[in-house]
Image: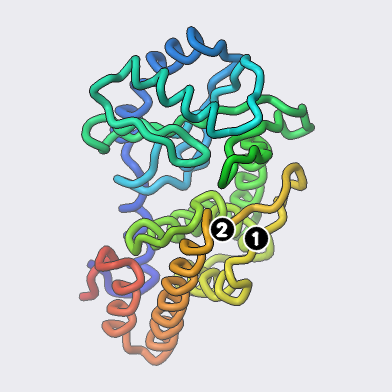
Amino acid sequence: MAKTVDEAFSIFIDRLIPSATERSKAASHRQAIYDKLDNRFGLYRMFESGSFKHGTGISGKSDVDYFVSLKTTRPTYASSTLTAVRDALKERFPSTYIHTSRPAVVLEFGQGYERVEIIPAYADLSTDDGMRFDIAGVATEWMESTPEAHLKYVNACNDKAGVKGGAKQLARLAKAWKYYRNVPISSFYLEMRAAQHMATQFSVIYPLDFCYFLNSLNRHLLADMNDPTGNTGRIKACSSEANYIDARSKLATAVARANKAVELSKAGRASEAFAQWDLVFDGRFPAYY
Protein backbone atom coordinates (compact mmCIF):
# COMPACT_ATOMS: atom_id res chain seq x y z
CA MET A 1 0.00 0.00 0.00
CA ALA A 2 1.09 3.58 -0.63
CA LYS A 3 0.05 7.12 0.25
CA THR A 4 1.10 8.81 -3.01
CA VAL A 5 1.29 7.79 -6.65
CA ASP A 6 5.04 8.45 -6.70
CA GLU A 7 5.50 6.14 -3.72
CA ALA A 8 3.29 3.52 -5.37
CA PHE A 9 5.39 3.55 -8.55
CA SER A 10 8.54 3.05 -6.46
CA ILE A 11 6.98 0.08 -4.67
CA PHE A 12 5.64 -1.33 -7.94
CA ILE A 13 9.00 -1.14 -9.70
CA ASP A 14 10.66 -2.97 -6.81
CA ARG A 15 8.06 -5.73 -7.10
CA LEU A 16 8.74 -6.12 -10.81
CA ILE A 17 12.46 -6.87 -10.40
CA PRO A 18 13.10 -10.61 -10.80
CA SER A 19 14.72 -12.41 -7.89
CA ALA A 20 18.18 -13.93 -8.10
CA THR A 21 16.51 -17.33 -7.67
CA GLU A 22 14.38 -16.84 -10.80
CA ARG A 23 17.41 -16.08 -12.88
CA SER A 24 19.62 -18.82 -11.44
CA LYS A 25 16.99 -21.53 -12.00
CA ALA A 26 16.64 -20.71 -15.69
CA ALA A 27 20.40 -20.22 -16.11
CA SER A 28 21.11 -23.61 -14.54
CA HIS A 29 20.37 -25.29 -17.87
CA ARG A 30 23.00 -23.28 -19.75
CA GLN A 31 25.80 -25.85 -19.85
CA ALA A 32 23.58 -28.71 -21.00
CA ILE A 33 22.17 -26.54 -23.80
CA TYR A 34 25.64 -25.39 -24.82
CA ASP A 35 27.02 -28.95 -24.93
CA LYS A 36 24.17 -30.24 -27.09
CA LEU A 37 24.30 -27.41 -29.62
CA ASP A 38 28.09 -27.37 -29.76
CA ASN A 39 28.09 -31.09 -30.46
CA ARG A 40 25.44 -30.78 -33.18
CA PHE A 41 26.34 -27.52 -34.91
CA GLY A 42 29.60 -26.25 -33.44
CA LEU A 43 29.45 -22.93 -31.57
CA TYR A 44 31.76 -19.94 -31.75
CA ARG A 45 30.19 -18.61 -28.58
CA MET A 46 27.04 -18.56 -26.46
CA PHE A 47 26.23 -15.40 -24.52
CA GLU A 48 23.35 -13.98 -22.54
CA SER A 49 21.21 -11.20 -23.95
CA GLY A 50 17.66 -9.93 -23.42
CA SER A 51 15.79 -8.58 -20.40
CA PHE A 52 17.74 -10.31 -17.64
CA LYS A 53 21.07 -9.21 -19.09
CA HIS A 54 19.83 -5.67 -19.71
CA GLY A 55 18.31 -5.29 -16.25
CA THR A 56 14.77 -4.79 -17.58
CA GLY A 57 13.23 -8.15 -16.73
CA ILE A 58 9.83 -8.70 -15.09
CA SER A 59 9.41 -11.09 -12.18
CA GLY A 60 7.56 -14.21 -13.29
CA LYS A 61 7.46 -13.13 -16.94
CA SER A 62 10.92 -12.62 -18.43
CA ASP A 63 13.10 -15.35 -19.92
CA VAL A 64 16.83 -15.95 -19.82
CA ASP A 65 17.93 -15.34 -23.42
CA TYR A 66 21.05 -16.69 -25.08
CA PHE A 67 22.51 -15.93 -28.49
CA VAL A 68 24.25 -18.98 -29.94
CA SER A 69 26.70 -18.20 -32.74
CA LEU A 70 26.62 -21.26 -35.03
CA LYS A 71 29.52 -22.58 -37.08
CA THR A 72 27.32 -24.24 -39.70
CA THR A 73 26.57 -22.57 -43.04
CA ARG A 74 23.57 -20.26 -42.91
CA PRO A 75 20.67 -21.74 -44.90
CA THR A 76 18.42 -19.70 -47.18
CA TYR A 77 15.47 -19.82 -44.82
CA ALA A 78 15.72 -18.97 -41.13
CA SER A 79 12.98 -21.48 -40.38
CA SER A 80 15.38 -24.28 -41.31
CA THR A 81 17.80 -23.27 -38.56
CA LEU A 82 15.06 -22.78 -35.97
CA THR A 83 13.67 -26.24 -36.71
CA ALA A 84 17.10 -27.88 -36.55
CA VAL A 85 17.96 -26.23 -33.23
CA ARG A 86 14.54 -27.08 -31.79
CA ASP A 87 14.86 -30.73 -32.81
CA ALA A 88 18.37 -31.01 -31.35
CA LEU A 89 17.20 -29.61 -28.02
CA LYS A 90 14.20 -31.95 -28.00
CA GLU A 91 16.65 -34.84 -28.18
CA ARG A 92 18.45 -33.52 -25.11
CA PHE A 93 15.33 -32.54 -23.14
CA PRO A 94 12.60 -34.97 -24.30
CA SER A 95 10.22 -34.20 -21.41
CA THR A 96 10.43 -30.41 -21.79
CA TYR A 97 8.01 -28.37 -23.88
CA ILE A 98 10.17 -26.83 -26.63
CA HIS A 99 8.81 -24.66 -29.43
CA THR A 100 9.83 -21.90 -31.80
CA SER A 101 8.84 -18.27 -31.29
CA ARG A 102 10.76 -16.09 -33.71
CA PRO A 103 13.58 -15.32 -33.47
CA ALA A 104 14.08 -17.96 -30.77
CA VAL A 105 13.66 -21.56 -29.74
CA VAL A 106 11.92 -21.56 -26.35
CA LEU A 107 12.46 -24.18 -23.65
CA GLU A 108 9.85 -24.18 -20.88
CA PHE A 109 11.39 -25.97 -17.93
CA GLY A 110 9.44 -26.54 -14.73
CA GLN A 111 6.06 -26.37 -16.53
CA GLY A 112 6.93 -22.97 -17.95
CA TYR A 113 8.22 -21.34 -14.76
CA GLU A 114 11.83 -21.52 -15.99
CA ARG A 115 11.85 -20.29 -19.60
CA VAL A 116 15.00 -20.14 -21.66
CA GLU A 117 15.11 -18.61 -25.14
CA ILE A 118 17.83 -19.71 -27.53
CA ILE A 119 18.42 -17.36 -30.48
CA PRO A 120 20.36 -19.08 -33.27
CA ALA A 121 22.66 -16.56 -34.92
CA TYR A 122 25.24 -16.33 -37.68
CA ALA A 123 28.07 -13.83 -37.28
CA ASP A 124 27.89 -11.31 -40.11
CA LEU A 125 30.05 -8.25 -39.44
CA SER A 126 32.28 -6.94 -36.67
CA THR A 127 31.39 -3.39 -35.60
CA ASP A 128 32.95 -0.99 -33.10
CA ASP A 129 30.18 -1.92 -30.65
CA GLY A 130 30.34 -5.69 -31.10
CA MET A 131 29.42 -8.33 -33.63
CA ARG A 132 26.45 -8.03 -35.96
CA PHE A 133 24.47 -11.24 -36.40
CA ASP A 134 21.82 -12.61 -38.73
CA ILE A 135 18.87 -14.02 -36.76
CA ALA A 136 15.40 -15.24 -37.74
CA GLY A 137 13.05 -12.52 -38.92
CA VAL A 138 9.27 -12.26 -38.75
CA ALA A 139 8.56 -14.60 -41.68
CA THR A 140 11.16 -16.80 -43.39
CA GLU A 141 13.79 -14.09 -43.80
CA TRP A 142 16.90 -13.26 -41.83
CA MET A 143 17.30 -9.94 -40.04
CA GLU A 144 20.28 -8.14 -38.56
CA SER A 145 20.87 -7.87 -34.81
CA THR A 146 23.63 -6.28 -32.74
CA PRO A 147 22.81 -7.30 -29.16
CA GLU A 148 26.02 -5.95 -27.63
CA ALA A 149 25.59 -2.55 -29.29
CA HIS A 150 21.99 -2.35 -28.11
CA LEU A 151 23.01 -3.15 -24.54
CA LYS A 152 25.63 -0.39 -24.66
CA TYR A 153 22.99 2.05 -25.91
CA VAL A 154 20.53 1.15 -23.14
CA ASN A 155 23.26 1.43 -20.52
CA ALA A 156 24.35 4.83 -21.83
CA CYS A 157 20.79 6.20 -21.73
CA ASN A 158 20.27 4.65 -18.31
CA ASP A 159 23.40 6.25 -16.87
CA LYS A 160 22.63 9.76 -18.12
CA ALA A 161 22.94 12.44 -15.43
CA GLY A 162 19.62 13.44 -13.92
CA VAL A 163 17.78 10.29 -15.04
CA LYS A 164 20.16 7.60 -13.77
CA GLY A 165 18.31 4.28 -13.76
CA GLY A 166 15.37 5.80 -15.63
CA ALA A 167 15.71 4.05 -18.98
CA LYS A 168 15.66 0.56 -17.52
CA GLN A 169 12.88 1.27 -15.04
CA LEU A 170 10.73 2.88 -17.73
CA ALA A 171 11.31 -0.17 -19.93
CA ARG A 172 10.35 -2.39 -17.00
CA LEU A 173 7.07 -0.48 -16.53
CA ALA A 174 6.33 -0.77 -20.25
CA LYS A 175 6.98 -4.51 -20.22
CA ALA A 176 4.79 -4.93 -17.12
CA TRP A 177 1.92 -3.29 -19.01
CA LYS A 178 2.64 -5.52 -22.01
CA TYR A 179 2.63 -8.75 -20.00
CA TYR A 180 -0.21 -7.96 -17.61
CA ARG A 181 -2.49 -6.67 -20.36
CA ASN A 182 -1.37 -9.28 -22.93
CA VAL A 183 -0.29 -6.67 -25.47
CA PRO A 184 1.30 -8.36 -28.53
CA ILE A 185 4.19 -5.92 -28.84
CA SER A 186 7.92 -6.59 -28.95
CA SER A 187 9.72 -6.25 -25.61
CA PHE A 188 12.84 -5.21 -27.53
CA TYR A 189 10.89 -2.42 -29.25
CA LEU A 190 9.59 -1.14 -25.90
CA GLU A 191 13.08 -1.22 -24.42
CA MET A 192 14.61 0.72 -27.31
CA ARG A 193 11.78 3.27 -27.23
CA ALA A 194 12.13 3.69 -23.46
CA ALA A 195 15.88 4.26 -23.74
CA GLN A 196 15.32 6.71 -26.59
CA HIS A 197 12.78 8.62 -24.47
CA MET A 198 15.14 8.92 -21.52
CA ALA A 199 17.97 10.07 -23.77
CA THR A 200 16.04 13.35 -24.20
CA GLN A 201 15.12 13.86 -20.52
CA PHE A 202 16.93 15.69 -17.71
CA SER A 203 14.85 14.37 -14.80
CA VAL A 204 12.50 11.46 -14.19
CA ILE A 205 9.13 11.27 -12.44
CA TYR A 206 7.81 7.81 -13.22
CA PRO A 207 4.03 8.47 -13.27
CA LEU A 208 4.55 11.40 -15.64
CA ASP A 209 7.27 9.84 -17.77
CA PHE A 210 5.35 6.60 -18.20
CA CYS A 211 2.26 8.56 -19.19
CA TYR A 212 4.27 10.67 -21.66
CA PHE A 213 5.92 7.49 -22.98
CA LEU A 214 2.58 5.81 -23.68
CA ASN A 215 1.32 8.96 -25.38
CA SER A 216 4.44 9.08 -27.54
CA LEU A 217 3.94 5.48 -28.66
CA ASN A 218 0.34 6.30 -29.49
CA ARG A 219 1.20 9.47 -31.44
CA HIS A 220 3.71 7.53 -33.51
CA LEU A 221 1.14 4.76 -34.11
CA LEU A 222 3.68 2.13 -33.00
CA ALA A 223 5.65 2.89 -36.13
CA ASP A 224 8.85 1.02 -36.92
CA MET A 225 11.82 2.85 -35.42
CA ASN A 226 15.31 3.40 -36.74
CA ASP A 227 17.94 1.47 -34.84
CA PRO A 228 19.33 4.15 -32.48
CA THR A 229 22.78 2.55 -32.70
CA GLY A 230 22.78 2.79 -36.50
CA ASN A 231 23.99 -0.80 -36.85
CA THR A 232 20.86 -2.53 -38.18
CA GLY A 233 17.64 -1.78 -40.02
CA ARG A 234 14.22 -0.76 -38.71
CA ILE A 235 12.88 -2.20 -35.45
CA LYS A 236 9.30 -3.44 -35.65
CA ALA A 237 6.76 -3.14 -32.86
CA CYS A 238 4.64 -6.15 -33.83
CA SER A 239 5.11 -9.41 -35.71
CA SER A 240 1.90 -9.26 -37.78
CA GLU A 241 -0.88 -6.92 -38.88
CA ALA A 242 -3.34 -8.64 -36.53
CA ASN A 243 -0.99 -8.10 -33.58
CA TYR A 244 -0.47 -4.50 -34.63
CA ILE A 245 -4.22 -3.81 -34.61
CA ASP A 246 -4.61 -5.47 -31.21
CA ALA A 247 -1.63 -3.61 -29.73
CA ARG A 248 -2.88 -0.24 -31.05
CA SER A 249 -6.27 -0.82 -29.44
CA LYS A 250 -4.80 -1.77 -26.06
CA LEU A 251 -2.36 1.13 -26.22
CA ALA A 252 -5.19 3.61 -26.80
CA THR A 253 -6.97 2.25 -23.73
CA ALA A 254 -3.81 2.53 -21.62
CA VAL A 255 -3.22 6.09 -22.80
CA ALA A 256 -6.74 7.15 -21.85
CA ARG A 257 -6.35 5.63 -18.38
CA ALA A 258 -2.86 7.04 -17.79
CA ASN A 259 -3.93 10.53 -18.88
CA LYS A 260 -6.91 10.36 -16.56
CA ALA A 261 -4.69 9.17 -13.70
CA VAL A 262 -2.33 12.12 -14.14
CA GLU A 263 -5.21 14.63 -14.24
CA LEU A 264 -6.77 13.09 -11.13
CA SER A 265 -3.45 13.35 -9.30
CA LYS A 266 -3.15 17.02 -10.23
CA ALA A 267 -6.66 17.56 -8.86
CA GLY A 268 -5.71 15.94 -5.56
CA ARG A 269 -7.98 12.93 -6.12
CA ALA A 270 -5.38 10.35 -5.19
CA SER A 271 -7.61 7.32 -4.63
CA GLU A 272 -9.19 7.75 -8.07
CA ALA A 273 -5.75 8.17 -9.66
CA PHE A 274 -4.65 4.92 -8.02
CA ALA A 275 -7.71 3.19 -9.48
CA GLN A 276 -6.78 4.30 -13.01
CA TRP A 277 -3.18 3.12 -12.68
CA ASP A 278 -4.50 -0.17 -11.32
CA LEU A 279 -6.52 -0.55 -14.51
CA VAL A 280 -3.44 0.15 -16.63
CA PHE A 281 -1.57 -2.67 -14.89
CA ASP A 282 -4.53 -5.07 -14.63
CA GLY A 283 -4.90 -5.06 -10.85
CA ARG A 284 -1.19 -5.30 -9.92
CA PHE A 285 -0.65 -1.68 -8.90
CA PRO A 286 -0.15 -1.00 -5.15
CA ALA A 287 -3.27 -0.07 -3.21
CA TYR A 288 -3.97 3.40 -1.84
CA TYR A 289 -4.28 4.12 1.87
Please state the total of marks drawn on the protein image. Answer: 2
The residue drawn where x is 60% and y is 76% is 219
Mark 1 vs 2: CB contact within 8 A: yes
Residue 129 visible? The answer is yes
Q: Earlier in the sequence, mark 1 or mark 2?
A: 1
**Vertical placement of residue 255 versus 245, above or below:** below
Tag 1: amino acid: Asp
How far is the residue under mark 1 from the one under mark 2?
6 Å
Q: Quadrant of the C terminus?
A: bottom left
Which label number is shown at residue 237? 2
Q: Residue furthest bottom?
A: 267
Residue 283 in the image, given as x and y percentages of width and height: 25, 67
- In the image, 100: left or right of 38? left
Q: Residue furthest top?
A: 39
- Counting from the top left corner in percent of width and height, residue 257 is at 39, 80
Q: Which residue is mark 1?
A: 224
Report the residue at 56% width, 54% height from top.
Answer: 189
**Type of colouring:** rainbow
Question: Label 2 is placed on what type of residue?
Answer: Ala
Residue 21 higher or lower than 73, as above or below: below
- 266 on left or right of 119: left
Point 45% across, 82% down: residue: 259
Q: Is residue 166 visible?
A: no
Please, is residue 194 above or below residue 149 in the view? below
Residue 162, picture quadrant: bottom right
Secondary structure found at label 2:
loop
Residue 46 at x, y = what percent? 54, 21
Residue positioned 50% across, 39% down in the render: 50
Dot 2 surroundings within 10 Å: few (below 14), some, or many (20 or more)?
Answer: many
Residue 207 at x, y percent in the picture? 45, 71
